[in-house]
Image: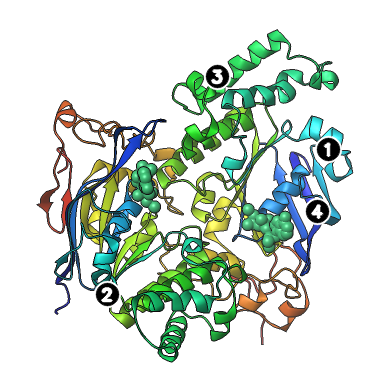
């Protein structure tokens, strides 16, 4: 296994949620993922960015089998797991782990931290108790928490510490790929920085591959090797972090970058031009899905849906007009 | 002082709980000029919302206690005013509030239009100096004023760039997006033509794109309408975008205050410096602030930042530093501030 081989490959992945009226009849589809393709190389950190509602969490959960894919392939370590039911894919997915956006959702308030950390090992392995306990202590140390925390309850520790416990919990299963869903959202910058440092050191220590989902582009720029930009269920740009941040090709990526405040730089409030919010994924525009907000839109954009074009080194963008 | 709209002095607020009493604001000094946008910055739990609620007179009655201090607003001592006067003349009229969680700001069972009507019925700027002020509660809503208020509401909803304002008024709060709700909050805050708008983390839950739109709007409208804005945030980037001056709080004590250029150009408190270094956009790479904010039930004595500060000395453990003026309108509370001439020997 050389560094850089493909560990996870996603092709044509779709996840449609039914839209129902008050009588529970289906009246349409919400296309949360609408033909998503990309691959992840062993050992890299791939960032997934985009405004809320663009499908980032749905992508993570569909890869994990928490949602069943509507169509498409997810090849993880050589097996297509896209259409498997959770119980069928458990043995494949043990090494693919999802770290929830809201740590409160993965820590049971009635359990001590020790209970929460033992649980995945009880479900997925037949390790005897002393070995489980040893693994739990090892992981708690790895995330920088003292062993005295094992007997505390989630509400007795800070938000930053809850994230650490959430990480320790998934690490107990020795995953190879970890999907981190907004791992620092809601944290103060000072705590965020310590969590990012921890993520990088865990990655080195355990040889992990990360799918790093975030709506914060500054954070993604700091720690990701490559980045995929999503808009309304589709990847509109993907490439090396350097290329995407220095020469963004898609007008949407350009707008996202222009919205980040830069202290000492120009004021975004004086220059930012993108208007409105994304349209509903139940009613997508014809052609290019970004055209309703795009400053460069042409008649062509309403007629044809642009594919991802691999026209630049280390970078692809789905735009008719990008150059 | 000329042009001073709000001045908070020596404000001490504690919260009672089973575990003891927490000193959440510990002698805070804070001031604002008419028409300025002032940032109140600090990590969560440092007391931003508590200060905002103290100014508005809406601290929870059963647990919070104002132990000492003074809050003067536009020539009046707010802590000395009876609740009835505060409710009728100040809150929602002279001082408007955009609370941290906008989803709790609206009542889910009424349409947005009904709630705005209610606001205008009692807090319309047309009431100012009017005689129907006192009996307003029992009176029906006079037709002419209602029409004038309605026109004003629609005008402001257009100004905050809500698409199709008439339709928005017929919607329920859950039917609009987070960004639209925040636009509504800004419109509602500005409707009574207040002298001060307190916006508590108005963009924290929003995407950067929507944040940029909302900040732009807040700045532009506050300027046009001559309202001062107290903008609390834990995001220094957002503060940079719109503030004239910034105050940094740490664990219930203000530690540095400066005009925006001095603040970012010459941060002088070690906490300010560390906050800036922990920004993901900082050139310092990834640097957190080791340690955690102190428990306010038994806070560290002296400067509350000293347990996390690499410049701390015995003096810092013993004594809270007094504010020191180090530049035009720039003051800092630190015994060993950054950039001070090192003592000889
Ligand atoms: N379980 C679900 N049922 C129906 N719609 C859903 C479900 N989960 C997510 N969605 C919708 O799918 C879209 C993408 O959501 P999500 O993946 O959570 O976005 P993000 O994580 O990027 O904010 C949204 O429009 C959301 O409302
Ligand atoms: N109603 C309350 N009862 C008890 N403690 C409170 C209450 N509200 C706030 N606190 C405490 O006061 C401190 C400051 O909180 P807050 O003013 O909300 O900070 P910020 O807005 O800066 O995040 C925190 O330690 C918080 O736990
Ligand atoms: Mg999400
Ligand atoms: Mg707050």
Pointer 3 or 4: first along the chain:
4
Residue A205 position, x and y percent, is 33, 82
Quadrant (top left/top right/bottom left/bottom right) for the N terminus of chain B: top right
Quadrant (top left/top right/bottom left/bottom right) for the C terminus of chain B: bottom right
Quick check: do tags 2 and 4 share a chain? no
User: Quadrant holding ligand 2?
Assistant: bottom right
Gap in Å between the C-alphas at discs 2 and 4? 56 Å
Residue contact at pointers 1 and 4, CB within 8 angstroms? no
Gap in Å between the C-alphas at discs 3 and 2? 56 Å
SS for dot 3: helix
Q: Which residue is mark 1?
A: B75
Q: Which residue is mark 3?
A: B154
Relative vertical location of residue A87 with respect to residue B34 in this rendering, above or below: below
Gap in Å between the C-alphas at discs 1 and 4? 14 Å
Q: Which residue is mark 4?
A: B9
Relative vertical location of residue A2 with respect to residue A249 in this rendering, above or below: below
Residue A65 position, x and y percent, is 29, 59
Relative vertical location of residue A262 with respect to residue A7 in this rendering, above or below: above
Quick check: do tags 3 and 2 share a chain? no
């Amino acid at each position: 296994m050389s560094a850089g081989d493909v560990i996870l490959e996603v092709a044509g992945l779709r996840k449609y949620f039914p839209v129902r009226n008050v009588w529970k009849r289906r009246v349409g589809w919400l296309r949360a993922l609408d033909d998503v393709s990309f691959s992840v190389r062993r050992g890299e950190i791939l960032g997934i960015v985009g405004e809320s509602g663009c499908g980032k969490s749905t992508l993570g959960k569909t890869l994990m089998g928490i949602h069943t894919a509507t169509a498409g392939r997810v090849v993880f370590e050589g097996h297509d797991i896209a259409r498997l039911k959770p119980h069928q894919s458990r043995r494949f997915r043990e090494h693919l782990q999802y770290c929830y956006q809201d740590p409160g959702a993965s820590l049971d308030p009635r359990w001590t931290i020790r209970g929460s950390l033992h649980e995945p090992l009880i479900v997925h392995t037949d390790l005897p108790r002393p070995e489980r306990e040893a693994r739990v202590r090892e992981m708690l140390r790895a995330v920088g928490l003292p062993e005295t925390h094992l007997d505390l309850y989630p509400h007795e520790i800070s938000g930053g510490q809850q994230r650490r416990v959430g990480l320790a919990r998934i690490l107990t299963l020795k995953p190879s790929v970890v999907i981190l869903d907004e791992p620092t959202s809601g944290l103060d910058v000072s705590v965020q920085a310590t969590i990012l440092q921890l993520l990088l050191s865990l990655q080195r220590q355990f040889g992990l591959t990360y799918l790093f989902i975030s709506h914060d582009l500054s954070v993604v720029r700091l720690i990701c090797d490559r980045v995929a930009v999503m808009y309304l269920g589709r990847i509109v740009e993907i490439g090396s972090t350097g290329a995407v941040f220095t020469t963004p090709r898609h007008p949407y990526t350009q707008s996202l970058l222009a919205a980040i405040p830069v202290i000492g730089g120009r004021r975004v409030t004086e220059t930012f031009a993108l208007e409105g919010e994304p349209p509903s994924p139940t009613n997508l525009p014809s052609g290019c899905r970004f055209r309703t907000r795009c400053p460069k839109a042409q008649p062509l954009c309403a007629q044809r849906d642009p594919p991802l074009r691999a026209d630049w080194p280390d970078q692809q963008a789905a735009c008719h007009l990008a150059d | 002082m000329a042009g001073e709209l709000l001045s908070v002095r020596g404000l001490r607020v504690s919260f009672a709980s089973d575990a003891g009493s927490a000193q959440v604001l510990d002698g805070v000094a804070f001031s604002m000029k008419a028409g300025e946008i002032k940032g109140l910055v600090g990590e969560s739990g440092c007391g931003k919302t508590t200060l905002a609620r103290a100014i508005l007179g809406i601290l929870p009655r059963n647990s919070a206690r104002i132990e000492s201090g003074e809050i003067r607003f536009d020539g009046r001592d707010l802590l000395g005013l009876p609740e009835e006067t505060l409710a009728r003349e100040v809150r929602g009229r002279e001082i408007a509030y955009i609370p941290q969680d906008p989803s709790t700001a609206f009542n889910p069972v009424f349409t947005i239009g009904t709630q705005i009507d209610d606001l205008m019925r009692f807090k319309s700027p047309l009431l100012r100096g009017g005689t129907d002020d006192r009996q307003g509660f029992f009176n029906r809503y006079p037709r002419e004023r209602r029409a004038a208020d309605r026109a004003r509401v629609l005008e402001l909803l257009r100004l905050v760039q809500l698409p199709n304002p008439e339709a928005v008024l017929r919607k329920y709060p859950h039917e609009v997006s987070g960004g639209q709700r925040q636009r509504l909050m800004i419109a509602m805050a500005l409707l009574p033509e207040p002298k001060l708008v307190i916006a508590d983390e108005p963009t924290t839950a929003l995407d950067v794109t929507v944040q940029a739109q909302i900040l732009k709007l807040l700045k532009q409208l506050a300027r046009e309408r001559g309202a001062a804005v107290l903008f609390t945030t834990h995001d220094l980037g957002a503060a940079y975008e719109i503030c004239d001056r910034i105050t940094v709080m740490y664990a219930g004590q203000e530690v540095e205050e400066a005009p925006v250029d001095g603040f970012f150009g010459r941060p002088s408190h070690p906490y300010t410096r560390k906050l800036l270094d922990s920004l993901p956009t900082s050139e310092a790479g990834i640097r957190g602030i080791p340690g955690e904010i102190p428990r306010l039930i038994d806070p560290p004595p002296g400067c509350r930042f000293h347990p996390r500060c690499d410049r701390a000395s015995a003096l810092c453990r013993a004594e809270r530093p007094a504010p020191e003026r180090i530049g035009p309108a720039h003051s800092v509370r630190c015994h060993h501030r950054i950039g001070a001439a090192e003592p000889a020997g």
